Amino acid sequence: SHYFPRDKNYSQNISKIIHNHGLNGVISLLARRLARLVIKTAKTLTSKVVIRAASATAGLFVLQALYVLVKTPRLSPPDKSGVNFPREGLSVSLQNEDRCRIEKGSADSAGKGSKTKWREFRLVLIGDSPVEGIGNSHHSVALSGRTAEAFAKLVCRSGREHDDRALKGKQYDSVRYWSYGKSGLTARGVNREMVPLLHRVVDDVVSSSNGDTAAENCFEKPIHAIVLLCGVNNVLDPRPTTFY
């Protein structure tokens, strides 16, 4: 009777919850009510009653977790994600203060026709599903592309910027980025599967730079920034922290 009082308003509320949120909403409501009851009566009821109420609450939480697991859609990453990300990377250049342009190609092709050497800021992202781009159609709108754009606005100069004050700190013409991620990886998985790809990028940059290319300072800084994203899958993993 505590959970289902016989009044019209309560029945109407339950009907609204079922209509708006489905079974998951009803389970959430019952779980919250059970939890409040356990906390409220823990000091007055016998331990057996408390254990029974706690067990009921746990059962509802498990049911809710299974419902979410079944109903949650499995989203796919963009084309050429993870280990298949373009080995030459993607390049982001700043057209103006608010707009960026994303293109493929090497540093040499990007700076072709320019009288000055083309300078690139190199960015590598490694991690789990957000780095892979789960749920996005293109890398340009995923975490990696947006991060590269943010760096471009900070370190790149656009064609309209001629004032020395505006160019302060903006030493580069574009940002080239690589995004190596895989859904479900723990920290150990990132270290085992994605970090070697980071080393491969460094080797590629160094081997492709012969002193007369656009990457003038590549031997000093093959990679200028690294973004590491992981940890959520470690939380979901039932193994103890000592395992990692």
Image: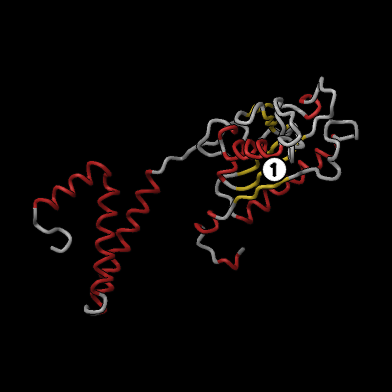
Above/below status of 84 relative to 110: below
Q: Position of residue 227 (x, y in %)?
A: 66, 47
Seen as rendered, the residue at the extreme top is: 113
Question: The N terminus is located in which quarter?
Answer: bottom left
Residue 90 vs residue 241, the one in the foreground: 90
**Colour approach in the figure:** secondary structure
* Residue 231 placement (x, y as % from top left): 57, 55
Taking the image as shown, residue 72 lies to the left or right of residue 167, namely left
Q: Amino acid at mark 1?
A: Val
Position above or below: 61 against 131: below
Give the side of residue 52 with respect to residue 125, left or right.
left
Instruction: Say which of 67 and 150 sits in front.
Output: 150
Instruction: Look at the image and tell me in which quarter the C terminus lies.
Output: bottom right
Residue drawn at (40%, 48%) of the image: 69
The residue wearing badge 1 is: 124
Which of the 4 quarters of the picture holds residue 207? top right
The quadrant in which residue 61 appears is bottom left
Which residue appears at 55% of the width and 58% of the height? 234
Disc 1 residue crowd, few under 14, some 14–19, many 20+, Cα 10 Å: many
Labels in figure, total: 1
Q: What residue appears at the point 90 percent right and 35 percent down from the top-left corner?
A: 211
